Amino acid sequence: MLGFTALQTFLIFIALFAVIYWITPKKLSWLPFVLITIAFAWIGFNVVPDPADDLSRYFKALNEMRDGGYDTLQRYINENQFDFKTFRVAAYYVYFISKLPTNQWLPCITMFIVYGLGFYCIYKASKRFGISKTNTFLGAMFFICTYWYYDTCSGTRNGLAFAIAFACSYQLLVERKYKLLCYAGFVIASLTHSGGIIPVVLVILAEITFNTSGKFLNFLLVFGIIGGAAGIRWLASISDNSFIQGIAGKVDGREAAAIDFSSTGTMFRVNMVVLVVVIALILYFSYFILNCDYTSELKRFYKYSSIVAYFCVGALFSGLIFVRFVRWILPLVGGMIYMIGMQMENNYIDEKGISYCKYYSPSTVAIRVRFKPIVTFAFIAFMAVHLWYMCNGSSLIWMHFDFEWSYL
């Protein structure tokens, strides 16, 4: 765009989102989210994949399906390329996009769906819980600054599965509407990529354990993933079901490979810090979320967020399972926990008075209130640092446009 690189365009769109958001009336607060979703989809349309990217392999499949039609789709399924024999939704997703005139529609539509669903959840939560414009903005920026754009753009299926699973989880747990569509979404996520199965299982746990203490469950989530992997391998050994075999293949492969903590690099440490930040937010805002007027709905979301966070701690020893949750689930969990929790804290202070909160309220509340400015500053500073890292050390540095597409 006007000679800018793909990375520069990405940053320009973020800056434009910030400007448009603040000049847009609150009654039209959905408009900036729609515009940045379209902008990120536009970047996806113009991205040129590196030959080593997964997206290049998908482009090859699109070309073959465009030439060979449905017969080529069936060949891909029969040969189990991309695990299409098990994950049929992904197979038909690629096939239907092959009907479009250019391969660029694949990353374009993928990014539109992923960011559209993410901003949908943020917008719905903002409206439902009366969240201020400032807190909504900060929650949305956390999502933008910590979500790994190019990993989704290139990988396609895994980020798409996580986005669908999270959106349906929010809709089911908080909005409590369109439950049949949510269940359909869970099926779609599970049949898009093997990674989509895990967030579906976690939302089921959140739903069925809503009224139970979370301490024992959290212990199981931290240590149970190792036993879960062993259980999947055992099921695969006694069953020839393609779905189980497909999951088992991931468990035995690089996705579940144990992490060698002695050789981890900056990328892994950054993911670790994101997890620590999200856990800190969950703990800091726990009192205000669990004791506000929206107890039922927020308790469910808080339960789900806690389960996801503790699962990520357990998944530290399971390679890409941990990485995918940190890059595709925690950005939304962290952003929404902050914007909801900060609004509930503001409501509490407005109701009780700042003097009461600092000097007469229970010590756990008083400490939180006194540390509120520090938490806000640290939250904003972390977003800025993570955005800097994304532009200098994440997969975004591999994103580029074709030269002739760099001009309008």
Image (spheres, rainbow, N blue to C red):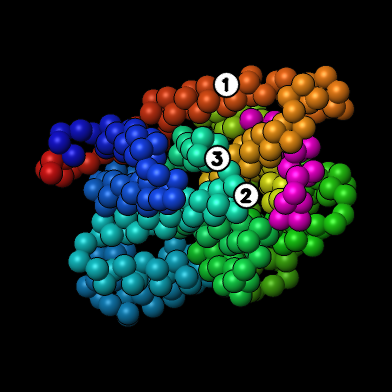
Residue 160, position as x, y percentages in the image: 47, 57
Residue 287 is one of the magenta-drawn residues: yes
Split into 4 quadrants, where in the image is the C terminus? top left
Residue 140, position as x, y percentages in the image: 49, 41
Q: Write the residue at 47% across / 50% down.
A: 119
First in sequence: mark 2 vs mark 1: 2
Q: Dots 3 and 2: beta carbons under 8 Å?
A: no
Q: CA distance from mark 3 to mark 2?
A: 9 Å
Q: Write the residue at 73% across / 42% down.
A: 289
- Helix, strand or loop status at disc 1: helix
The residue under label 3 is 132
Q: Write the residue at 72% across / 62% down.
A: 204
Mark 1 or mark 3, whichever is nearer to me: 3
- Helix, strand or loop status at disc 3: loop
The correct choice, above or below, for 127 with respect to 341 in the image is below
Tell me which amino acid carries mark 2.
Answer: Phe
From the image, give the main secondary structure of the stretch colored magenta: helix
Crowdedness near tag 3: few (<14), some (14–19) or many (≥20) residues, C-alpha within 10 Å:
some
The residue under label 2 is 129
The residue under label 1 is 377
Tell me which amino acid carries mark 3.
Answer: Ser
- Helix, strand or loop status at disc 2: loop
> 134 or 222: nearer the eye?
134
Let me know if residue 345 appears in the view. Answer: no
Magenta-colored span? 277-297
Taking the image as shown, residue 126 lies to the left or right of residue 308, namely: left
Tell me which amino acid carries mark 1.
Answer: Phe
> 94 or 184: nearer the eye?
184
